[in-house]
Image (cartoon, helix red, strand yellow):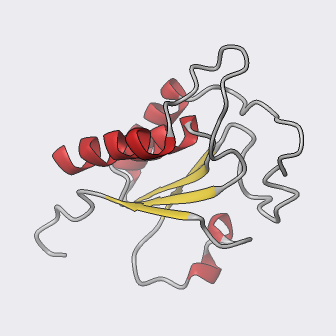
Amino acid sequence: WDAETLLAHHLVDTLGHPSTGSGGRDLPCLGLRAVELGAGTGLAGVVAARLGFHVVLTELGDDILRVLRRNAERNLPAQTPAMPGVLTPQERGCPGISHGGFKVCELSWGEPVQSHPELGGSPFDLVLVADCVYIPEL
């Protein structure tokens, strides 16, 4: 998954280093929304969440969704730290986003976005796509 790794490095290089969750490091993208399409293992989405984005990780199929959810749970803090003056996802009109900074959902491309409440609310500030098509039929 070379492109996913390159995308994760690009996020860190351009947006700042992810917070380790320890005392007072700035989260440059706190409160912004991101979606990762065809997330696979979710590396880029996890990095975006560590930078402060509230991320929706999308994939297709039960097995990969389980792996994706487990990876996100293992690599993201239980809660995104609050910062004074920054709107929460709920205040920004994004009630489907969990307070942990990520949500995993199944998404088949071509379906109307309206059929996925997890994707509703305000528009995404960032769309991540890397190594997203590996199935020959697609």
- Left or right: residue 76 compared with residue 5: right
Q: Position of residue 77 (x, y in %)?
A: 63, 26
Q: Quadrant of residue 121?
A: bottom right
Whether residue 1 is visible to the viewer of this picture, yes or no, is: no
Residue at image coords 82%, 35% = 83
Residue in front for this viewpoint, 124 or 10: 10
Q: Residue furthest left?
A: 136
- Left or right: residue 30 compared with residue 87: left
Q: Quadrant of residue 49?
A: top right
Residue in front for this viewpoint, 56 or 59: 56
Asked if residue 120 is positioned above or below residue 112 in the image, the reply reads above
Residue at image coords 25%, 45% = 6
Residue in front for this viewpoint, 84 or 119: 84
Residue at image coords 64%, 20% = 21
Q: Position of residue 52 (x, y in %)?
A: 63, 41
Asked if residue 104 is positioned above or below residue 112 in the image, the reply reads above
Asked if residue 56 is positioned above or below residue 63 in the image, the reply reads below
Q: Position of residue 4 (x, y in %)?
A: 27, 47
> What is the tally of numbered marks visible in this picture?
0
Q: Quadrant of the C terminus?
A: bottom left
Whether residue 109 is visible to the viewer of this picture, yes or no, is: yes
Q: Residue furthest top?
A: 22
- Left or right: residue 37 compared with residue 24: left
Residue at image coords 23%, 57% = 131
- Left or right: residue 5 compared with residue 75: left
